[in-house]
Amino acid sequence: MEFIERPSPNCDDRELPVSMIVLHYTGMPDAEGALDRLTSPEAKVSAHYLVDEDGSIYRLVDESKRAWHSGRSRWRGANKAGGSNAYNSPSLSATASRGPDPRCRNSGFPCRRLWLFAISHLLRWTVRR
């Protein structure tokens, strides 16, 4: 699988093995703005991958590291609030470069064809390894 490397300094050592994949979006107007934010040391936020509308996949954080992609969050009792990394550490994050497509009101995710193709390809590649 081909990636465009755009390393983010916003990561650290993983304390737990990967056990979930988190899909979310940045809400930024375009991929370049999202990449700037996710790679800014001042922002202290990142993702493992960013998928642009055109299907390009950027690798920001190596999977062996913990990306800082979730703020206050909870999943099945794992609580990220208060500084715990219980949610970030076992997850791998794939981020859409923009917010939801208005044609997909109920999904909360972009339904642009190239984005969907790229994210499904990335997920299959990740799970197979």
Image (tube, rainbow, N blue to C red):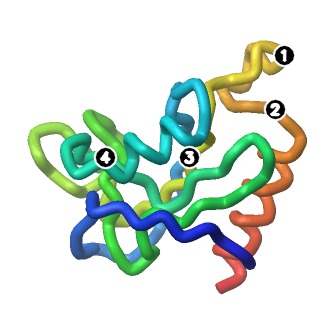
- Residue 21 percent across, percent down from the top left: 54, 58
Mark 1 Cα-neighbour bin, 10 Å: few <14, some 14–19, many ≥20: few
In front here: 113 or 42?
42
| Residue, disc 2 | 111
Q: CA distance from mark 3 to mark 1?
A: 19 Å
Q: Mark 1, mark 4: which one is toward the viewer?
A: 4
Amino acid on which disc 2 is placed:
Cys
**Residue in front for this viewpoint, 77 or 53:** 53
Residue type at mark 1 is Arg
Q: Are the residues tagged 1 and 2 within 8 Å (C-beta)?
A: yes
Tag 4 or tag 1, which sits nearer the N-term? 4
Q: Earlier in the sequence, mark 2 or mark 4?
A: 4
* Residue 41 in picture, x, y percent from top left: 22, 51
* Secondary element at tag 4: loop
70 left or right, relative to 58: left
Q: Which residue is mark 1?
A: 103
Label 1 element class: helix
Which residue carries the number 3 mark? 95
Q: Are marks 4 and 3 in contact (CB under 8 Å)?
A: no
CA gap, disc 2 and disc 4: 24 Å
Q: Position of residue 123 (x, y in %)?
A: 70, 64
Q: Distance between the Cα atoms at labels 1 and 2?
A: 8 Å
Question: Residue lying farthest right?
Answer: 113
The answer to whether residue 13 is visible is yes
Residue type, mark 4 in image: Val
